[in-house]
Amino acid sequence: MFVDNDQCRNVDFEPKQHESFGSIAVDRTVSVIIPTFNRGQLVMAAVESVLSQGISGVEVIVVDDGSTDGTRELFQEHRPGVRYVYQQNGGVSAARNRGVVESSAKLIAFLDSDDLWAPGKLRAQLDRVTSDGVLSFQGVGWFVDADGDTSLLKQVSQVIWPRIDADGFVVDAVLDVAEGRYFHLGTMLCTRAAFLEVGFFDPALSMGEDEDWFSRASLTKRFHYDSSPLLQRRFHSDQTPNDSEKSLRSLKTVFERIVDRTAEGHKRASRVAVKRLAAKCSHLANYLNAGHRYDEASREMVKAYSLTPFNMLRLMKLLFFAGKSYLPRRQDP
């Protein structure tokens, strides 16, 4: 089915009415939302990895966020189980939100257009989502190229995995999200009702929108985690950089929110979130300093130091940046 709607970016994202979930064991239909932007050379492999799961009643919703590389033409021909929605460029969060609005199944999942699901991914998770209160996550593996060479699949050693109990449930999801333990949106399966209860992704965030969503979800939902690497991520040259000013400011905003959310009733998570927020402020300050924007760098380092007042390195950087900011003004007539 081909849907062309240039006004998708401005859609009203208020949750629409949906039927009561009922018994998941009887009706296991899943809407899989794949946002894409100028990844025509990769997106079809992602779609195929979903269609080959061997689960009946799966619909794939590809939301094209304004691609100009011929992605549109790839979906002109009707394919059973695949819907294509085009919208003006609004970012990955707007595209995912649009996919949720367009979805019709009782379960929803997400997959980035440059990633792949391993065979059996959906089947492994279906029985775990027993209610609207449970989100199911899987482990992740990585490719080091964009060609899907499975011999290169690996797990990255520096990733910190969630802590789980004997039944596979995350012991403290609020704390694990605050610590940055690895939950990947491409492995999540949940009910549509659960997603809508947590709310949509924030389109204003260019980076960390998934972490922001997980933080909200962790306050009311149980996370189930299985370490089997059933999502296969692909490293390639077209990935979104996380060191731009926009990305750094977005990540700072995410952790400001996490600090606010954990301030009451989650002391350990709050302490961790404060430290990570200080680190985000410090990273942004370093970026601004490298661009000779010393006043702004000083302000960000003040925030970082105020959050971690006994960090001598940040104090030294604060004084250094402040000195740089002051010296040019002293030379003015």
Image: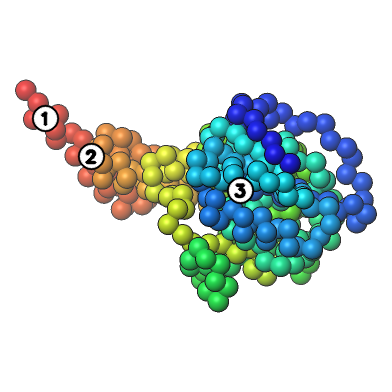
**Which residue lies at the image location 31% right of the left edge and 47% below the top edge?**
286
User: How would you rate the neighbour count of disc 1 (Cα within 10 Å): few for under 14, some for 14-19, many for 20 or more?
Assistant: few
Name the residue furthest left. 333
Residue at disc 1, secondary structure: helix
Between circles 1 and 2, the one closer to the viewer is: 2
Q: Residue at x 9, y 26 (%)?
A: 332
Residue holding disc 3: 74
- Of all residues shown, which one is farthest toward the top? 333
Going from N to C along the chain, the mark reached first, 1 or 2, is 2
Residue at the image point whose x is 75% and y is 67% from the top: 120
Q: Circle 2 sits on which residue?
A: 292
Residue 223 visible in the picture: no
In the rendered image, which quarter contains the N terminus?
Answer: top right
- Marks 3 and 2 in Cβ contact (< 8 Å): no
Label drawn at residue 330: 1
CA gap, disc 3 and disc 2: 45 Å
Disc sitting over residue 91 in the figure: none
